């Protein structure tokens, strides 16, 4: 049996694989702190406690190896003795917008080196912000880890990361797949602070006796490097060969297509990143808001997401307003940290059911913008698999199919994709085998064919116009 640990933003999820199939699952919730507008932080110690809570739900005595997956771009700052210096600054934190602009000015070819234009959510600009705003913490930095790699440190006691997670820092040269001194210099980062780089199934340590006792794992079993959640999610649906793609609908959202070469497209904020497997890359549109607006508006209404979706399905389609879903700004394809969410078109006959439907449609419209940004790269010849918690909703997937014109196929076990991918990396480390045989396309469920929806496409056109109209207003503060 193999354990995959996926450190998400809202929860930590565990998957145990036996004979290549999901045998058991568990999880524990996490919360996010926002001490100032636009800030998003978590305490690394809370991740470890959540992992202990989740592990206590499972019998882990037969586990042979552990794989890691996690939210990307977070900055875990460590001082002497691996002391955590401050809460982790997360992927959806916008405080370093000015630092991102400064990085672009310092290194004009940053997008060709790093695979995407600098944005505040990435890790590197956070260090320039830290030097300016928290100089004492900056002076104490000795090591920097990504969120899943902090879990790795607690598991095996060492410093390590994989190339797919490193790809999202703006410190990795995507073509050479190694740390880039020029990118470090442009972001006030000492290259010696960065951990050694590995491929996803490389063994980076063994579970220590202390970690084994805390988590119920066998001591001494191998821990593999793993991958960022986008890459491990790709592994779980067999996106390891050129042209195979998927959408992921978690707190954030991704449109991902695998490639066998480095193909940057920074002007559209399409990420061109190293995969967690050797000699593979991918292109990805990354939306900060994903399915998060569903959970947000459900919270506003005091209901759960399932109730919101039921209410959305019963809404009068002629009374649906527009909703921009940009709760924390947006990355792909706008690169806009300032834009914020809004409803438009409310009148005295608008009910909350129609507002629920508007939020669902906004998730679909965001994915339509992502598809448009890929251009000819996304030819539509192959269906896109759908993974993540948002993929459990028929309404959400049909809305995305209609708005994008893409055929979607729900993957079985979709909500546990990244954790499954991490467990498969652990299995590959122990058992070996051809990559295409280990990371296979899963069994699929319902197919969602696009249908002709003129009213929906008209609202998509107005949605795009509304964003363009509000963008200067948001930029002005």
Image (cartoon, rainbow, N blue to C red):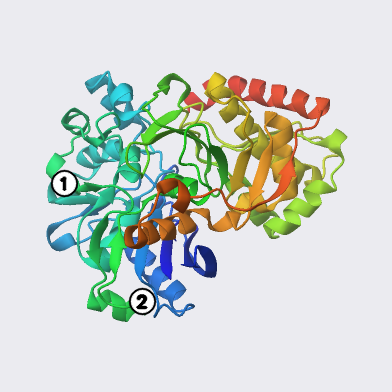
On screen, residue 50 versus residue 471, left or right, reads: left
Q: Is residue 87 visible?
A: no
Q: Residue at x 79, y 54 (%)?
A: 310
Q: Residue at x 44, y 50 (%)?
A: 232
* Neighbourhood count class around disc 1 (C-alpha, 10 Å): few under 14, some 14–19, many 20 upward: some
On screen, residue 300 versus residue 259, left or right, reads: right
On screen, residue 197 versus residue 259, left or right, reads: left
Q: Position of residue 57 (x, y in %)?
A: 49, 78
Question: Looking at the image, is 471 positioned above or below residue 291?
Answer: above
Observer-nearest of 144 and 96: 144
Image-quadrant location for residue 68: bottom left
Observer-nearest of 238 and 54: 238
Task: Say the numbered circle drawn on residue 193.
Answer: 1
Image-quadrant location for residue 455: top right
Task: Say the numbered circle drawn on residue 239.
Answer: none
Q: Position of residue 238 (x, y in %)?
A: 51, 46
Q: Is residue 381 visible?
A: yes
Q: CA distance from mark 1 to mark 2?
A: 28 Å
On screen, residue 222 versus residue 403, left or right, reads: left
N-term mark: 1 or 2: 1
- Position of the N terminus by quadrant: bottom left
Question: Looking at the image, is 233 positioned above or below residue 171?
Answer: below
Image-quadrant location for residue 344: top right
Q: Residue at x 38, y 31 (%)?
A: 119
Question: Looking at the image, is 368 positioned above or below residue 45?
Answer: above
Task: Say the numbered circle drawn on residue 215.
Answer: 2
Observer-nearest of 262 and 347: 262
Q: Is the Cβ of the residue at disc 1 closer than 8 Å to that at disc 2?
A: no
Task: Report helix, strand or loop for mark 1.
Answer: helix
């Amino acid at each position: 049996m193999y354990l995959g640990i996926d450190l998400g933003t809202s929860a930590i999820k565990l998957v145990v694989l036996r004979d290549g199939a999901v045998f058991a699952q568990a999880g524990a919730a996490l919360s996010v702190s926002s001490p100032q507008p636009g800030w998003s932080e978590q305490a690394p110690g809370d991740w470890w406690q959540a992992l202990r809570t989740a592990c206590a739900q499972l019998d882990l005595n037969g586990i042979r190896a552990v794989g890691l997956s996690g939210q990307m771009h977070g900055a875990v700052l460590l001082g002497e003795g691996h002391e955590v210096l401050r809460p982790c600054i997360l992927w959806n934190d916008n405080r370093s917008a000015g630092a991102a602009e400064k990085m672009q000015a310092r290194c004009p070819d940053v997008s060709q080196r790093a695979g995407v234009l600098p944005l505040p959510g990435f890790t590197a600009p956070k260090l320039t912000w830290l030097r300016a705003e928290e100089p004492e913490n900056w002076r104490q930095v000795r090591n920097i880890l990504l969120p899943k790699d902090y879990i790795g440190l607690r598991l095996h006691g060492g410093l390590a990361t994989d190339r797919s997670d490193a790809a999202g820092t703006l410190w990795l040269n995507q073509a050479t797949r190694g740390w880039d001194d020029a990118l470090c210099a442009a972001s006030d980062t000492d290259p010696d602070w960065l951990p050694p780089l590995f491929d996803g199934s490389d063994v980076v340590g063994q579970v220590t006796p202390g970690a084994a006792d805390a988590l119920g794992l066998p001591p001494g079993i191998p821990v593999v490097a793993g991958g960022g959640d986008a890459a491990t999610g790709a592994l779980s649906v067999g996106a390891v060969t050129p042209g195979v793609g998927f959408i992921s609908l978690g707190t954030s959202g991704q449109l991902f297509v695998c490639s066998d070469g480095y193909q940057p497209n920074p002007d559209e904020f399409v990420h061109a990143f190293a995969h967690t497997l050797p000699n593979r890359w991918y292109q990805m549109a990354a939306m900060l808001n994903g399915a998060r607006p569903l959970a947000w508006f459900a919270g506003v209404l005091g209901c759960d997401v399932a109730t919101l979706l039921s209410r959305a399905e019963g809404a009068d389609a002629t009374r649906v307003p527009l909703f921009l879903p940009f709760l924390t700004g947006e990355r792909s394809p706008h690169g806009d940290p300032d834009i914020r969410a809004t409803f438009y078109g409310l009148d005295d006959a608008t009910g909350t059911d129609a507002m629920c439907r508007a939020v669902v449609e906004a998730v679909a419209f965001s994915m339509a913008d992502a598809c448009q940004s890929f251009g000819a790269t996304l030819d539509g010849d192959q269906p896109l698999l759908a993974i993540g918690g948002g993929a459990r909703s028929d309404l959400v997937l049909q809305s995305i199919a209609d708005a994008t014109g893409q055929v979607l196929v729900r993957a079985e076990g979709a909500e546990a994709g990244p954790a499954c991918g991490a467990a498969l990396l652990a299995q590959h480390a122990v058992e070996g085998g051809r990559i295409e045989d280990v990371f296979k396309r899963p069994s699929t469920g319902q197919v969602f064919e696009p249908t002709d929806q003129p009213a929906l496409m008209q609202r998509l056109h107005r949605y795009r116009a509304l964003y363009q109209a509000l963008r200067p207003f948001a930029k002005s503060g």
